Amino acid sequence: MTRELKVDTAVLCTTCHGDGAAPGSHPVPCETCRGQGEVAHVQRSFLGEVRTLRPCAACRGFGSIVPDPCRECAGDGRVRSRRSLTVKIPAGVDTGTRVQLTEQGEVGPGGGPAGDLYVEIHVAPHETFVRQGNDLHCTVSIPMTAAALGTTLTMPTLEADVAPEAEVETELETEFELDIRPGTQSGTETVLRGRGVPGLRGGRGDLIVTVAVDTPTKLDPRQEELLRELAAIRGEEQPLGQVRAGTKSVFGRLRDAFNAH
């Protein structure tokens, strides 16, 4: 996908074309460094003379001096301007991903080459899916009867957000069928391979669908009668319940591992 951005950057001055001189004038070579942009410094030490090169303070390293600066850019060769850019965002980016736009940054002083512009991506939360790496997670709620008898649900895909209107033909898959097996328990996870987020280096993550079984909180007399009849048929009028040990924490499992030796 693409996005339009407005950025405030330094661009080339159109009056002086980057040399910083007013119309009708031109830069002259610096007399201090003789147009080299750097001067030599000699420092004496117990090891002898140490010769170093430093940027010329008179011309600031440019090698030339502007006697009559451009009034538009004050001799800098660039001005501030707001411009629009089209950013192509590759599939699979995540929050914190940076997209590099070559030579779309600020122009250097004196009409120097432009740098690069880095656009940092922030991904907004999705209404349906939660992203973990390249995998997508979502929860689907079904009634108790559908969990017991089984059903087929129509689920949206991630591409449904960018698909055109229904009247326009498209090859994008906007929905798929999810089979709920009879006897599905609340918390059951179904992993759908290759239906997650595309990877920046190829491949695609998975979609993990978690089933949440809704237990009715209000029943009319007929519904309550039918459920009591079902409980009687299944011998569940006075269920004993099954007590299981809770899931141990990481530290609990480590403690048990050390105690076993």
Image (spheres, grey):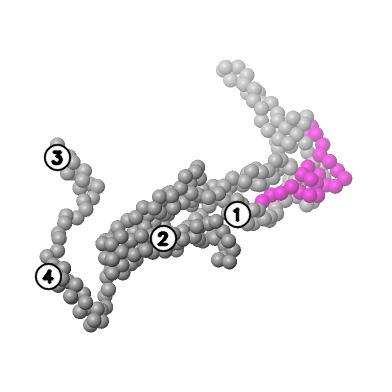
From the viewer's side, name the closer residue of 56 and 176: 176
Residue lying farthest bottom? 221
Q: Quadrant of residue 190?
A: bottom left
Q: Nearer the viewer, mark 4 or mark 3?
A: 4
Decide which of tag 4 and tag 3 comes sooner along the chain.
4
What's the residue type where badge 4 is placed? Answer: Gln
Q: Is residue 189 magenta?
A: no
Which element type, helix, strand or loop, lies under badge 2? strand
Type of residue at label 1?
Thr
Q: Earlier in the sequence, mark 1 or mark 3?
A: 1
Q: Amino acid at mark 2?
A: Glu
Q: Secondary structure at mark 1?
A: strand
Nearer to us of marks 4 and 2 is: 2
In depth, the one of 83 and 30 nearer the eye is 83
Residue 131 sits in quarter:
bottom left
Q: Which mark is residue 260?
A: 3
Could you say which disc has been placed on residue 2 in the image? 1
Mark closer to the observer (1, 4): 4
Q: Earlier in the sequence, mark 2 or mark 1?
A: 1
Q: What span is in magenta?
A: 9-31
- Badge nearest the viewer, 3 or 2: 2
| Residue on which the image places disc 4 | 238
> Closer to the observer: label 2 or label 1?
2
Q: Residues within 10 Å of mark 2 (few under 14, many from 20)?
A: few
111 left or right of 210? right
| Chain-order first, disc 1 or disc 4 | 1
Q: Is residue 231 visible?
A: yes
